[in-house]
Amino acid sequence: MRRFVIVGQQAIATAHFSLLDIAGTSGRLDILLRCLRSALLVSHGLRRDTIVYLVLCGGEHAPRVLRADGRHIRFVRPDERQLAILVQKALARTPTDGPPNEFIEVRAGLAVASGGIEAVLADFRADTVASYVLEESARDIREVPLAFDDVVVFVGDHHGFNDAVRARLALEGASPISVGPVSLHADDAITLVCNEMDRRKQAS
Ligand SMILES: C[S@@+](CC[C@H](N)C(=O)[O-])C[C@H]1O[C@@H](n2cnc3c(N)ncnc32)[C@H](O)[C@@H]1O
């Protein structure tokens, strides 16, 4: 499996945001929604080999994590509003005081956990071989022997990563990689990583 973990430093951890102004009322959850689309959706389909984690670190009841599992999820539409509705319903239907780091399934392929990056790490540690963190100043993805399966990629939001998360990922052994010399929107950086992994897989 490929896993993408997007850390939203202010992204709201509850359903209390407006669908009429997602960016302005959700701590920039819109960034994470676009990342979800880039990591999970392809033209007319889903990447069945991909799991996406949105780490929501903003507002009341934070942190919480939403997990979208490409093996099981159905009816995911690519537009931001529909993705926002999907996430809003999932957050509303799961307890804000659930057991820490335990994913509660809302519907097939969609689950929510109370907890932050630790909930994510506990979910897949044993299954993952290679771990990367997307950083603008890191070594170029084309210069590393990039894995394309059993892999996890951590991605920052518009503020990048904070020091605590960066230190935690370093402790986990995540290798910093860059997708080129220009700082991109997080969802575009994910598209480039997916493309690079697709190419390596095809060539293998
Ligand atoms: C808009 S960037 C964050 C910019 C933020 N001002 C900073 O200094 O970290 C959002 C995220 O996308 C990823 N990203 C953007 N451009 C990238 C690049 N050229 N190489 C690697 N990752 C990139 C990183 O994970 C980054 O944290």
Image (cartoon, rainbow, N blue to C red):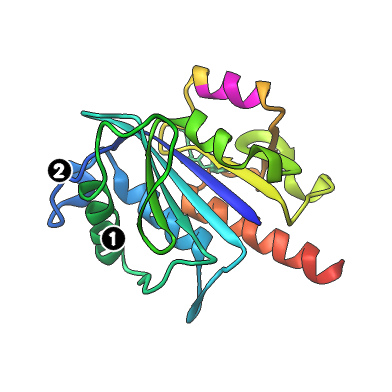
> Magenta residues?
165-170
Q: Choose between 18 and 65: the one closer to the eye.
A: 65
Residue 86's disc number:
1
Q: Residue furthest front?
A: 99
Q: Nearer the viewer, residue 41 or 104?
A: 104
Residue 185 makes an appearance in the image: no
Residue 59 shows in the view: yes
Say which quarter of the image contains residue 99.
Answer: top left
Residue furthest to the bottom in view is 44
Quadrant into which the C terminus falls: bottom right
Say what amino acid the circle numbered 2 marks.
His
Main secondary structure type of the part rendered in magenta: helix
Disc 2: which residue:
16
Residue 56 found in image quarter: top left
189 up-or-down from 77: above or below: above
Q: Which disc is residue 46 wearing?
A: none
SS at mark 1 in the image: helix
Residue 94 placement, left or right of 132: left
